[in-house]
Amino acid sequence: MTTGPEGERRTHKSEAAFRTISEVAEELDVPQHVLRFWETRFPAIQPLKRGGGRRYYRPEDVALLRAIRARLYDDGFTIKGVRKLLADMGSEALVRGAPALAAEPEAPRAEPAVREPDLPMALPVAPRAGLSPHQRAEIKAAIGSLLRLKAQVDQVLGDSSGVSAQE
C-alpha cells in the first residue's frame, strides 16, 4: 500500500504486483493461518519467501488460491477432493474452471439395469461404545442423505423405464 497526497491509503495494486499474505487473506476473506495451512496441503501453492519468512504471492498463486477457495467453500469439496482435482486436471485447468467441475454430468451413461438385492429387515448392529454423540449424529445425517439420494435414483429409474420403482 502507498500513501496518497492527503495521507489516505491506496490499496489498488497492479494486477501483476506481488501480494502479502495479509492482502491475499483480505481479498479471499479467509484468515492468514488458513492460507498457511493450504500451503501445507497443496504443493502447487509456492509463494516467494523473503528474509524473516515474509510471503509474497504471485498473481498466479492468488488465482490458484481463489480457485481452491471456491471449490472448498462454494462447491463443497473437501481438501482431499481439491487435491485430487489438482492432480487430475492441473492448476491451470482448476483456475480456468474446467468442465470437469460441472455439478452434473452432461449425458448419463448407459448401464444395464441392476436390481437392488433384497436385504434383511434387521441388519446386525455394531457396538456403539466407540462412537461419540457427534459421530452418531453425522452417521444418521449421512444415512438420511443416502436414503434421499436413493429415492431420487428410484424416481429417475422409474420415470425413464416407464415402470414404478416398486415393481
Image (cartoon, rainbow, N blue to C red):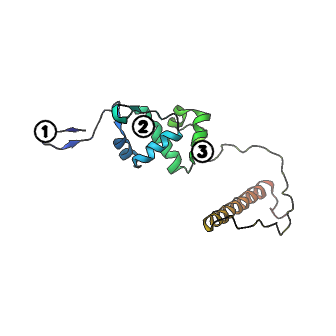
Location of residue 98 in the rendering, given as x and y in whole percent from the top left corner: 56, 37
Location of residue 61 in the rendering, given as x and y in whole percent from the top left corner: 44, 34
Q: Mark 1 highlights which residue?
A: 5
Is 21 left or right of 90, judged from the image as shown?
A: left
92 is higher (above) or lower (below) than 74: above
Q: Identify the residue at horizontal 42%, vertical 33% (top origin).
A: 47
Is 103 left or right of 95, judged from the image as shown?
A: right
Q: Mark 2 highlights which residue?
A: 62
Mark 1 or mark 2, earlier in chain: 1
Q: Mark 3 highlights which residue?
A: 80
Amino acid at dot 2: Val
Amino acid at dot 1: Pro
Q: Residues within 10 Å of mark 3 (few under 14, many from 20)?
A: few
Is 158 left or right of 60, judged from the image as shown?
A: right
Q: Residues within 10 Å of mark 2 (few under 14, many from 20)?
A: many
Residue 131: image tag: none
Q: Nearer the viewer, residue 32 or 153?
A: 32
Q: Identify the residue at horizontal 54%, vertical 49% (top origin).
A: 75
Mark 1 or mark 3, earlier in chain: 1
Amino acid at dot 3: Lys
